[in-house]
Amino acid sequence: MIHTDKVVVVEGKYDAIKLDGILDATVITTDGFQIFKDKEKQNLLMTLATKRGLIVLTDSDSAGFMIRNFLGSRIPQEYITNVYIPDIYGKEKRKDKPSAEGTLGVEGMPVEVLEEAFKKAGVLGEKPKTLERQITRLDFYEDGLMGGVGSKEKREKLLLKLELPKRLSTTSLLKIINILITYDEYKELLK
């Protein structure tokens, strides 16, 4: 398994699912071209980039490069590591026909090819940082942010304080909050 403290950005949920068994990392999707309009997600990616750095992994087709270039124009290059996949012709198993350009996307890449792409980008071999106490699902539950009356409203207030997109799921919020703030800062925010 490849470990990185950087946040990995991919186009869609099937790309994220593919990486789940390969990476020990936080993976965020752009939801394809939706990123062009979604100012909240753009701001989130900028914040994550300055805190941890981003690894951008998009398909090798023209759409993937449009998304990659868009992110590169919004986020300073010193925060971005680009991982490129080769042009391999074929179609993903879940699709009826190949993409317009006939190449496989991230979701269709063999694991060995993805590992090699990360290696070429210099991502392999990163050691996990010594972590402080992480904020957990149990903390969310005990603090009334999950599983209780009014928990959704409390999460929305926390999202607002952290200037995060209001559509973040509880699981995504938990991953992102552990990147942005410490446990002590989290407890202070809840006061």
Image: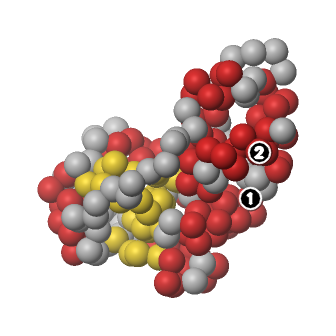
Report x, y in % for residue 13.
48, 45
Q: Quadrant of residue 96?
A: top left
Relative to residue 77, is residue 5 depicted above or below? above
Residue at the disc numbered 2: 188
Determine whether, in the image, residue 125 is placed left or right of residue 139: left
Relative to residue 166, is residue 150 depicted above or below? above
Distance (Cα) linking label 2 and label 1: 24 Å
Determine whether, in the image, residue 86 is placed left or right of residue 141: left
Report x, y in % for residue 2.
26, 54
Q: How many marks?
A: 2
Q: Is residue 87 visible?
A: no
User: The residue under label 2 is which amino acid type?
Assistant: Glu
Question: Which structural element holds mark 1?
Answer: helix
- The residue positioned 28% from the left and 41% from the top of the image is 21
Q: Closest to the observer: 44 or 97?
A: 44
- The residue positioned 74% from the left and 58% from the top of the image is 40
Determine whether, in the image, residue 96 is placed left or right of residue 32: left
Report x, y in % for residue 172.
58, 41
Relative to residue 4, is residue 151 depicted above or below? above
CA neighbours of label 1 inside 10 A, class few (<14), some (14 to 19), many (20+): some
Report x, y in % for residue 164.
73, 52
Determine whether, in the image, residue 155 is placed left or right of residue 168: right
Residue at the disc numbered 1: 40
